[in-house]
């Protein structure tokens, strides 16, 4: 059973590649190195994927990155083989809009 911060659910993803969608619509992909009870995340070797409906996906290198738990909308595991097979220069998509309450 997951605790208040969802920590039991995140333990299985430590040292694996995850994709995080933030409340402001950013998509950040990296290796989950750690987290705490407030679901603050530490991602290593990460990059932000900037989507555009007119050009391919731009990938901005971020390196080691901390994301505050209150800014996280979705966390998901990335299948490295499938992710590597995608030609992101050919992907067209509208950027996500921020979460509104």
Image: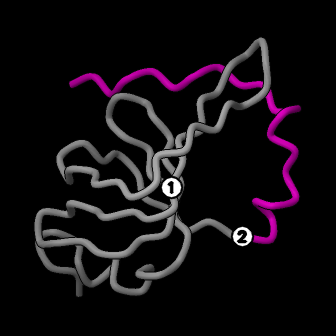
What is the crowding at mark 2: few (fewer than 14 residues within 10 Å), some, or many (at least 20)? Answer: few
Task: Find numbered disc 1 in the image and state the secondary structure of the residue it sits on.
Answer: strand
Tell me which segment is drawn in magenta: 80-101
> Pointer 2: what residue?
80
What is the crowding at mark 1: few (fewer than 14 residues within 10 Å), some, or many (at least 20)? Answer: many
Task: Find numbered disc 2 in the image and state the secondary structure of the residue it sits on.
Answer: helix
Identify the image quadrant of residue 90. top right
Identify the image quadrant of residue 25. top left
Q: In the displayed structure, does residue 1 sit left or right of residue 94?
A: left
| Up-down relation of residue 46 to residue 60 (above or below) | below
The residue drawn where x is 30% and y is 47% is: 72
The residue drawn where x is 40% and y is 51% is: 74
Residue 58: x and y in percent read 67, 31
Residue 36: x and y in percent read 16, 72
> Pointer 1: what residue?
46
Residue 61: x and y in percent read 55, 44
The residue drawn where x is 50% and y is 41% is: 27
């Amino acid at each position: 059973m997951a605790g208040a911060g969802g920590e039991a659910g995140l333990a299985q993803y430590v040292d694996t590649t995850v994709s995080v969608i933030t409340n402001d619509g950013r998509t950040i992909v990296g290796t989950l190195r750690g987290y705490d009870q407030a679901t603050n995340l530490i991602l290593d070797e990460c990059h932000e994927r900037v989507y555009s409906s007119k050009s391919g996906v731009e990938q901005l290198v971020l390196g080691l990155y901390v994301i505050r738990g209150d800014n996280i909308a979705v966390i998901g595991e990335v299948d490295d083989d499938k992710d590597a097979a995608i030609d992101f220069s050919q992907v067209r998509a509208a950027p996500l809009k921020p979460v509104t309450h």
